[in-house]
């Protein structure tokens, strides 16, 4: 590494030592500086990448709902079918969120779950039911009015709920997942689901319509 040329003859012995010393220092110093920069850059890249892709339920959790309803508990642990609650997804335009009566069907018997505080959450269900009110769930996926979208056409064509909504069955609180594909029209950043490019992309892949009037009329 140090094929150092000899220090110039003109230097005094002490300065000759200093010269050699400086050369010796320089290479490790350089290695240190460049590796620090390199490592820093690598960390930055990783941080950005995990920032974009390493979502966790907690970080990306959707809005706090009036009752802490968990899909993880109901869809995975208890294995209840999506269509048991979202009864219209294969029959009409809207998937629909279940009415209180569907919850009451089970929760008139099940008064508490395994999580701490679950008894209070479940009590709220019976409260809404007694008052004859529906639970004011906060809507997460919502298209503008000028877009036509029909669930049943997609569900019956064999498109899985998860292709559009992500792994809902693992969520304790539903959120809108990102589209993880990087495309030029989104400046190589992950596009939001429900954007026109997201619909078109799948339609092109599956040879479904890309006619403007199919979605806008
Ligand atoms: C026991 C009933 C139940 C089951 C089973 C269930 N859901 Fe839900 N789902 C709900 C309720 C209640 C909400 C509204 C509260 C919320 O967002 O958590 C909801 C909300 C959603 C939303 C968000 C709706 C919005 O506002 O945009 C999606 C998407 C969804 N569910 C998909 C699924 C999928 C996919 C499955 C099957 C893996 C499933 N659900 C199973 C009850 C259920
Ligand atoms: C088919 C039966 C069934 C239906 C329908 C059902 N639940 Fe449950 N739910 C259960 C059972 C069983 C548990 C206890 C599971 C556990 O904690 O292991 C539970 C647990 C819960 C909990 C506590 C969760 C926790 O973290 O421990 C809440 C809150 C809840 N349900 C809300 C709802 C709401 C709101 C609806 C209607 C949209 C609903 N459930 C529909 C069976 C049902
Ligand atoms: C091709 C994509 C796609 C598939 C497949 C899909 N959804 Fe959706 N979902 C959407 C879009 C888009 C919206 C917003 C619709 C709107 O605003 O009109 C939505 C909205 C919802 C909502 C909110 C209430 C409603 O009716 O609009 C629920 C609940 C839901 N989806 C559940 C499901 C379930 C359960 C399945 C599987 C049986 C499913 N979705 C399959 C794209 C999809
Ligand atoms: C993951 C794939 C996928 C995504 C995402 C998707 N679609 Fe589709 N879409 C399909 C398929 C497959 C068909 C063909 C269905 C058939 O043959 O009946 C279709 C058909 C349609 C049709 C024609 C059938 C009808 O209902 O009249 C419309 C309109 C439509 N989609 C709207 C949308 C909109 C709006 C979005 C975005 C919000 C969207 N789709 C996102 C797969 C997708
Ligand atoms: C597969 C369904 C689909 C098709 C086909 C489609 N669009 Fe869209 N379009 C959408 C959706 C979904 C949105 C809403 C995007 C959003 O909210 O970000 C949208 C939004 C738009 C907007 C409003 C954009 C804005 O920024 O406000 C225009 C304009 C538009 N579309 C024009 C067109 C034209 C022109 C065509 C035909 C070349 C077309 N669309 C084909 C689904 C579609």
Image (cartoon, rainbow, N blue to C red):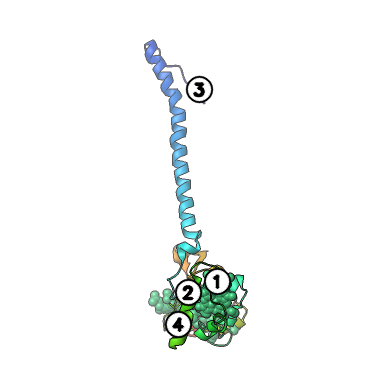
Residue 190 spot, x, y in % from top left:
47, 64
What residue sits right under mark 1 in the picture? 113
- Residue at image position (51%, 68%) is 172
For ligand 2, tell me if the residue under mark 1 lies within 8 Å.
yes
For ligand 2, tell me if the residue under mark 2 lies within 8 Å.
yes
In front: 6, or 167? 167
Q: Are marks 3 and 1 in contact (CB under 8 Å)?
A: no
> Marks 3 and 1: which is nearer the front?
1
What residue sits right under mark 3 in the picture? 3
Task: Measure the alpha-carbon separation of dots 4 and 3.
Answer: 84 Å
Is the residue marked by circle 2 packed among few (<14), some (14-19), or many (20+) residues within 10 Å?
A: some
- Residue at image position (52%, 64%) is 180
Q: Secondary structure at mark 4?
A: helix
Task: Measure the alpha-carbon separation of dots 2 and 3.
Answer: 75 Å
The tag on residue 127 is 4
Q: Are marks 1 and 2 in contact (CB under 8 Å)?
A: yes
Q: Secondary structure at mark 3?
A: loop
For ligand 4, tell me if the residue under mark 3 lies within 8 Å.
no
Q: Is residue 19 above or below residue 59?
A: above
Q: Secondary structure at mark 1?
A: loop
Q: Is residue 108 above or below residue 10?
A: below
Q: Is residue 4 above or below residue 83?
A: above
Mark 3 vs 1, N-terminal side: 3
Is the residue marked by circle 3 packed among few (<14), some (14-19), or many (20+) residues within 10 Å?
A: few
Task: Measure the alpha-carbon separation of dots 3 and 1.
Answer: 73 Å
Mark 1 vs 2, N-terminal side: 1
Q: Are marks 2 and 3 in contact (CB under 8 Å)?
A: no
The tag on residue 121 is 2
Q: Dividing the image into four equal quarters, which quarter contains ligand 2? A: bottom right
- Residue at image position (44%, 79%) is 137
Task: Measure the alpha-carbon separation of dots 1 and 4.
Answer: 17 Å
């Amino acid at each position: 590494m140090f094929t150092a040329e000899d220090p110039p003859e003109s230097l005094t012995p002490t300065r000759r030592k200093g010269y050699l010393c400086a050369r010796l220092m320089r290479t490790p110093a350089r290695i240190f500086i460049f590796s620090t920069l390199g490592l820093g850059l690598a960390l930055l890249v990783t941080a950005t990448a995990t920032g974009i892709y390493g979502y966790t339920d907690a970080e990306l959790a959707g809005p706090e709902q009036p009752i802490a309803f968990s899909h993880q508990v109901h869809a995975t642990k208890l294995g209840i079918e999506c269509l048991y609650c979202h009864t219209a997804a294969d029959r009409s335009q809207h998937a629909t969120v279940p009415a209180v009566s569907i919850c009451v069907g089970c929760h008139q018997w099940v008064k508490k779950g395994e999580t701490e505080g679950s008894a209070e959450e479940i009590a709220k269900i019976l409260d809404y039911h007694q008052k004859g009110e529906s639970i004011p769930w906060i809507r997460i996926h919502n298209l503008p009015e000028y877009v036509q979208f029909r669930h049943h056409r997609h569900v019956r064509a064999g498109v899985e709920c998860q292709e559009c909504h992500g792994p809902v069955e693992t969520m304790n609180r539903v959120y809108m997942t990102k589209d993880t594909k990087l495309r030029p029209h989104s400046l190589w950043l992950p596009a939001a689901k429900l954007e026109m490019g997201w619909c078109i992309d799948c339609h092109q892949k599956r040879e479904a319509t890309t006619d403007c009037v199919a979605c806008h009329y």
